[in-house]
Amino acid sequence: MTLRVFVHSRSKRAETITLLDSGATENFINISYAQKLKLPIKRLTQERRLFNVDGTPNKAGTLKYYTDIVTRTGTKCTRLCYFLTNLGDNQVILGYLWFTSTQPCYGSTPIFPLFSLT
């Protein structure tokens, strides 16, 4: 599933199609897209291994960089971490953390309901 999003930085405003992937454990932005938008890029203290959906290592290698972005979904704003890597044809992937933090709905039905275990 995809979603049209707007990205605002201090110097630019851009629109792109985002891949919604509840199977992705994190959120991602294509590193070249982040550089183009002049997003604040930070280096991870420890690199993380990155694998594709099929279990093969990502050809970009390890995750080295990230950016924190205030993400607005409807009227709700949440600061989320986005890891930067080569995403091929995609510019942004919203993963599990986006789903759990925003609780998007289709009509009145939550797309990704939260469950709490007590």
Image (cartoon, helix red, strand yellow):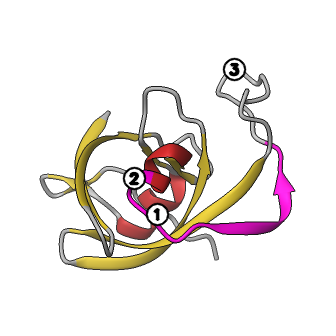
Dot placed on the residue nearer the N-terminal end, 3 or 1: 3
Residue 118: x, y in percent? 64, 77
Q: Residues within 10 Å of mark 1 (few under 14, many from 20)?
A: some
Question: Label 3: which residue?
Answer: 54
* Residue at 56% across, 40% down: 23
Residues in magenta? 36-49
User: Farthest left residue?
Assistant: 107
Q: Are marks 3 and 2 in contact (CB under 8 Å)?
A: no
Tag 2, which secondary structure?
Answer: loop
Q: Which of labels 3 and 1 is toward the front?
A: 3
Given residues 109 and 91, the one toward you in this image is 91
Asked if the residue at tag 2 contacts the one at tag 1, i.e. Cβ–Cβ closer than 8 Å, the answer is yes
In the rendered image, which residue does mark 1 sit on? 100
Q: Position of residue 115 (x, y in %)?
A: 50, 64
Evaluate if marks 3 and 1 touch, with contact meaning CB atoms under 8 Å apart. Answer: no
Query: What residue is rendered at 55% in x and 71% in y?
Result: 116
Q: Quadrant of the N terminus?
A: top left
Per the image, the residue denoted by label 2 is 112
Q: Is residue 67 left or right of residue 104?
A: right
Q: Nearer the viewer, residue 18 or 101?
A: 18
Q: Residues within 10 Å of mark 3 (few under 14, many from 20)?
A: few
Left or right: residue 87 compared with residue 74: right
State the SS at label 1.
Answer: helix
C-alpha gap between disc 3 and disc 2? 23 Å
- Tell which circle, 1 or 2, labels the residue nearer the N-terminal end: 1
Answer whether residue 5 is magenta in the image.
no
Identity, as a three-letter code, of the amino acid under mark 3: Asp
Between 84 and 3, the one nearer to me in the picture = 84
31 to the left or right of 65 = left
The answer to whether residue 87 is above or below residue 55 is below
Q: Where is residue 67, by image quadrant?
A: bottom right
